[in-house]
Image: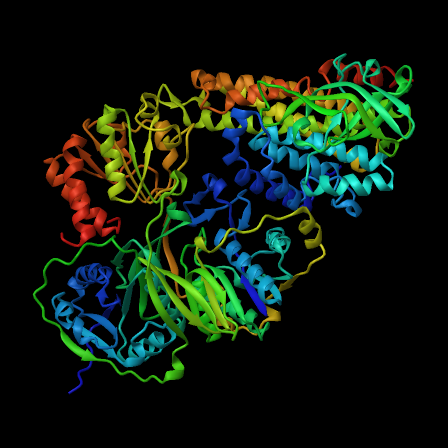
Amino acid sequence: MDFKLSEREELLRKSMREFAEKEIPPRMEAMEETGEFPVDLLKKMGDVGILGVITPPEYGGTGMGNLARIIILEEMGRVCPAIPMALQVHHMATQALSKFGNEEQKKRYLPPLAKGETMGVVAVTDPTGGSDVAGIKTSAKLDGDNYILNGRKCFITNSHVSDFWVVIARTGEGGRGLSAFIVEKSFSGAKLGRKENKVGLRGANTGELVFQNCVVPKANLLGHEGEGMNIAIQNIGETGRPGMASVALGILNAVLEQAVKFANERTLYGKSIGTLQAVQWHIAEIYADLEIARLLVYRVGWMRDNNIRCDAESALAKQFACEAAARSARKAIEIHGSYGVMKEYPVQRLLRDALVTIPAGGTGEISKLVMSRHALNMFK
Amino acid sequence: MRIIACLKPVPDPKHWGRLALDPKTKTLIREGIPNIINPLDKKALEAALQLREREGGEVITISMAPISTKPVLREGLAMGADWSILLSDLAFVGSDALATSYILATAIKKLAPYDLILCGDQTLDGCTSLVSPQIAEFLDIPNLMHVSAIEAQTRGVFRVRSQIEYGYMLVEIMPPMVLSVVKEVNEPRYITLMNILEAERKEIRVWSSKDLSLDEPWVGLKGSPSQMADLIIPTMKRKGEILQEEPLEMANVLADRLHRYRYC
Amino acid sequence: MAKTPQSKVWVFAEHREGKLAEVELELLGKSFELTELTGQKVALVLMGHQLNRFYEEILSFGADEILVAEHPLLKSYCSQTYVKVLENAIRKHQPEIFLLGATAMGTDLGARLAARLRTGLAARCIDLTISSEKKLLAVVPGWGGNVLATVHSPFTNPQMATVTPGVFDMPKGRNVTGQIIPLEVKLKPGDVTYQILEIRREEVQELALERAEVVIAGGWGIGSKEDWQWIENLASALNGVVGATRPPVDEGWAKEKQMIGQSGRTIHPKLYIGIGISGEMHHMVGIKGVEMIVAINQDPQALIFEWCDLGLVGDFKEVIPPLIKAIQNYKEGTH
């Protein structure tokens, strides 16, 4: 079992770190203030290959894979977690299209996503609740050559910075009555709803999509009728959860760096506080959280790249990493003392960012359902 | 055009906190400090790539370093260089700037005919700025240092900006030549995922002393006229001059010091 | 009647656009010091065209000999022609030590010359002494100044060094009028390998804190927004950027983006002047590796005095006005 990253992955990490450290900080203040994604960065990210990392080369990507994707998201997240939040949903759209799209759909929608001409969106969550996918009410009724969609999607990442969306809507009854559609913003009846004002991961645009007799051509059905639930679950499990876990991993990196820096430099009683055992324990726990989360997330990347089914491992990585990010950020704040709750110090923002990762892309509770389902069947 | 960029792997300054001194051997312990391409050399490579884009041709990187630095050279290939040469041999160990320049120049001779050799003005660790002019001397070709801009003229004559203390010189110079660049010259491009994949198919050729016709006494520790007598890592605390005089007097002392260090 | 140079220590007299560089005076001063015990003679080496315009000034410096290489082809600096002439002179007259300033010209010329002569050169050194073996010892910074090496060239001559401008003092009056001795120059037009078309001066531009070479920082001790103006004025006079610790930012005298230190910005200037700053850890942390740190503070016990190269104990309101005036005089050349 080789735990080392390959030369390619090391070089990838290095170049992604350079990109992130140079391009993101100048934009962070505006992101925190406005909650808007810096769209001017999108084309640069497309040029560097960040957007098409899991898109096949025939459609403008590199197909470098899931572990490469995780490394990219981790490095972006280390500088500003809102960025990989937006990127990971973008990748979810590319995954759904690559796996379930027909040739025309892939040719039409994948290249603009890889190039950074627009951002990708996967819209599953109805007002009825993201955890209750089978309870989706947004409807899609076949009418001649079109489907007519009615309903709304909420808490959708990249909603307002995207030209087309992968939308899950109801074409029939029950869990097998869901279908996936590619809805272009320009279709009649497709509207942008409210923008959300999040306490963390600001800079990843989150909002509502509204469908009022929205006309979607039959050609834009993704996969088959009734395949919607399957598409949504695979998308979340294979791409969404590892993506969110990578965001949390980025946060954990930043948290440890901030905590260590402060502990080494702040002096009390004539020496650095890093010499005090209580602080050392906090640091050890943060270090442990980072290492464990990293191992869990990288493993999912490896399993996906080797086509090994990993629903439980993916749920575990997501649930663990996001919780770890939140509790470690909290510890880092305590290490900072009162400075920890001052807005100029980044550590408080890291806690707010970590909190938002917990429900996003699947609540911890749902993750535990996935894990227990797997565990309860383990010894049969 | 054949353009050669000299790249030196240097310890990453982000981790220089790990630098330690072996008090017995008076050598630096660089354990665990990862290497990067010397930042000014990276800019030299970027300048080479931009020239290749303008004029066409080939960009080769050359480095004298241990075999373990191959991944660092791969980064140069991922930026866009066509292939790389790594000069590695135990016999090279202990070379000062003069011996290093000699070895690099001898290897570069094998790549003739070449048009330009590009280097960074200074390395982060050695900081001597000796190598680029000395390579030029061993190759008996002209050189310019402190280069902040390179323009190519149509008749094969280059117009180059070389920085001086209070501005710059505009110089007309013809290849073959050695140019060493300063930080103003460009911003190196980002490495793309596509390039990382391409770079894996590019060649890093390793040459040792048997591939080069070197004059043995001019190589390694014995080929290095510059010898080290002592090495210390000074502490951050400074033993400053503290003055407690009349304000006017102190102001004059400070102004004079600032003037002599060229701040006014 | 051509005389033969007797000097064993040679100092390169750099000049550009009709002005002699000050660094050779500093090197001269150090050379006089080094040769006090050995009694060796010190020469300045002057190269170029129509050099007699420098004679009066250069003779006043006190060098024992002025070695002059005069030729129209030396009018414009070109490393290969200068190296050719110097090599010839050095092989003929065998100096033991050859010093140049670590200037744009000196770093280039010194390096090529050392390679031509196959001798060692200590680059950008900050101190020179003579060892017990009568060899030149040079202290050379490496690793961005984090490491200091003492180097020598025990087996080759001349022992060469380029010296950082400003580290040595000017010579204290030496009552010697040197002899002007011409050096042989054998050059043909083909030796000149590049043309300097023109020299352009550059304006200093507005810089961000992180990239500034000169930072003037103020702390709690400034006291008021009105007095904060002195920080701005001094920064302006030195073409530097203003920095601040936390309290001035909290008080509104300085902006958030000007804050240096732990939660603020890490800076890497060459010159840092801290005024009214006590020197508490989390501010100082932001300024590792600065070449010159100056502190001005009323409290002689302030921590910052342990971290500075030059400390002034006093009221900044009384020090800064004459300081700015003196700086402006230097800039205008009226000092």
Instruction: Looking at this view, name the residue that lies furthest to the bottom.
Output: C1
Front position in the image: B79 or C122:
B79
| Relative horizontal placement of residue A116, taking residue A350 as reference (left or right) | right
The number of callouts visible is: 0
Residue A342 x/y as whole percent:
45, 19
Q: Is residue C271 above or below residue B91?
A: above
Residue A110, picture quadrant:
top right
Residue B182, picture quadrant:
bottom left
Q: Which residue is drawn at 55% across and 58% down?
A: B45
Q: How is the image coloured?
A: rainbow
Q: Residue at x 60, y 44 (%)?
A: A15
Q: Can residue A281 be seen in this view?
A: no
Front position in the image: C324 or B122:
C324
Q: In this view, does C290 lie above or below A80?
A: below
| Relative horizontal placement of residue B124, taking residue A208 as reference (left or right) | left
Residue C11 x/y as whole percent:
24, 67
Q: Residue at x 56, y 19 (%)?
A: A351
Residue A147 x/y as whole percent:
86, 26
Front position in the image: C201 or A342:
C201
Q: Is residue C154 above or below residue A209?
A: below
Quarter of the image for the N terminus of chain C: give it. Answer: bottom left
Q: Can residue C127 be seen in this view?
A: yes
Residue C295, picture quadrant:
top left
Residue B55 x/y as whole percent:
59, 67
Q: In this view, does B92 lie above or below A353?
A: below
